[in-house]
């Protein structure tokens, strides 16, 4: 599931099928943007620009001087992404919005169709460009499980 809300100008990449493509080019998802994504059932992986609410992002609580309306919008956006995760129940979520490498867990609930799954979504934040590859690059299996590069290789 591609919920990428930011991209480089002029960036070209293959388009996923319409039910998997939400938007590219903006940083804020709306309910209308995510509605098509919620019709296809559970997914294994979400790639998004931002992290969902209830994820502990390093330094996110730090007061950076953002205007109140911006922080309110950001909080609402993270809550919407949490709603998406609770509906889609991904095993893994990858994002880069906060430009820091971290891993966290988000309980989104179990599914009868996945009796072997504990209901935890593993959330992975990637660092910004011009940092070491083990901080800003990750290889993942088709199910989103991190594979063999730096810190990302030790996460389920």
Image: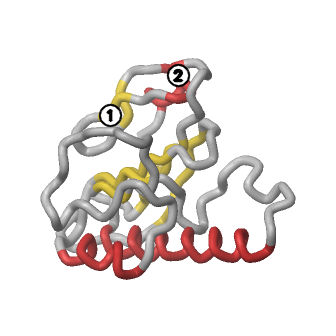
* Of the pair 44 and 100, the residue shown nearer to us: 100
Please state the horizontal and vertical placement of residue 14, each as a whole percent of the image. 19, 43
* Of the pair 151 and 70, the residue shown nearer to us: 70
Outermost residue on the front side: it is: 10
- Please indicate whether residue 59 sits to the left or right of residue 36 in the image: right
- Please indicate whether residue 142 sits to the left or right of residue 109 in the image: left
Q: Quadrant of residue 20?
A: bottom left
Question: Which residue corresponds to the image point at 18% horizontal and 53% vertical from the top-left?
Answer: 16
Outermost residue on the left side: it is: 17
Please state the horizontal and vertical placement of residue 77, each as a whole percent of the image. 55, 71
Please state the horizontal and vertical placement of residue 52, each as a whole percent of the image. 53, 64
Q: Which residue is mark 1?
A: 140
Q: How is the image coloured?
A: secondary structure
From mark 1 to mark 2, how far is it between C-alphas? 13 Å
Circles 1 and 2, Cβ within 8 Å, touching? The answer is no
- Please indicate whether residue 136 sits to the left or right of residue 88 in the image: right
Q: Which residue is mark 2?
A: 134
* Mark 2 burial class by Cα count in 10 Å: few <14, some 14-19, many 20+: some
- Compared with residue 125, is residue 53 higher up or lower down, i.e. above or below? below
Q: Number of labelled discs?
A: 2
Question: Which residue corresponds to the image point at 30% horizontal and 79% vertical from the top-left?
Answer: 35
Q: Secondary structure at mark 2?
A: helix
Please state the horizontal and vertical placement of residue 31, each as a whole percent of the image. 40, 81
Q: Secondary structure at mark 1?
A: strand
- Please indicate whether residue 14 sits to the left or right of residue 35 in the image: left
- For the N terminus, the quadrant is bottom left
Question: Which residue corresponds to the image point at 37% horizontal and 51% vertical from the top-left?
Answer: 47
- Compared with residue 62, is residue 69 higher up or lower down, i.e. above or below? below
Question: Which residue corresponds to the image point at 66% horizontal and 52% vertical from the top-left?
Answer: 57
């Amino acid at each position: 599931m591609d919920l990428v809300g930011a991209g480089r100008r002029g960036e070209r990449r293959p388009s996923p099928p319409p039910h998997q493509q939400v938007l590219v080019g903006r940083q804020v998802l709306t309910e209308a943007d995510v509605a098509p994504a919620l019709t296809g059932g559970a997914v294994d992986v979400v790639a998004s620009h931002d992290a969902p609410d209830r994820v502990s992002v390093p330094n996110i609580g730090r007061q950076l001087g953002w205007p109140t309306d911006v922080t309110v919008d950001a909080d609402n956006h993270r809550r919407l992404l949490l709603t998406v995760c609770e509906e889609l129940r991904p095993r893994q979520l990858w994002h880069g919005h906060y430009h820091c490498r971290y891993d966290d867990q988000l309980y989104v609930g179990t599914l009868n169709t996945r009796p072997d799954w504990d209901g935890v979504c593993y959330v992975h934040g990637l660092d910004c460009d011009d940092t070491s590859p083990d901080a800003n690059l990750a290889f993942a299996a088709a199910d989103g499980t991190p594979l063999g590069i730096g810190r990302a290789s030790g996460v389920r």
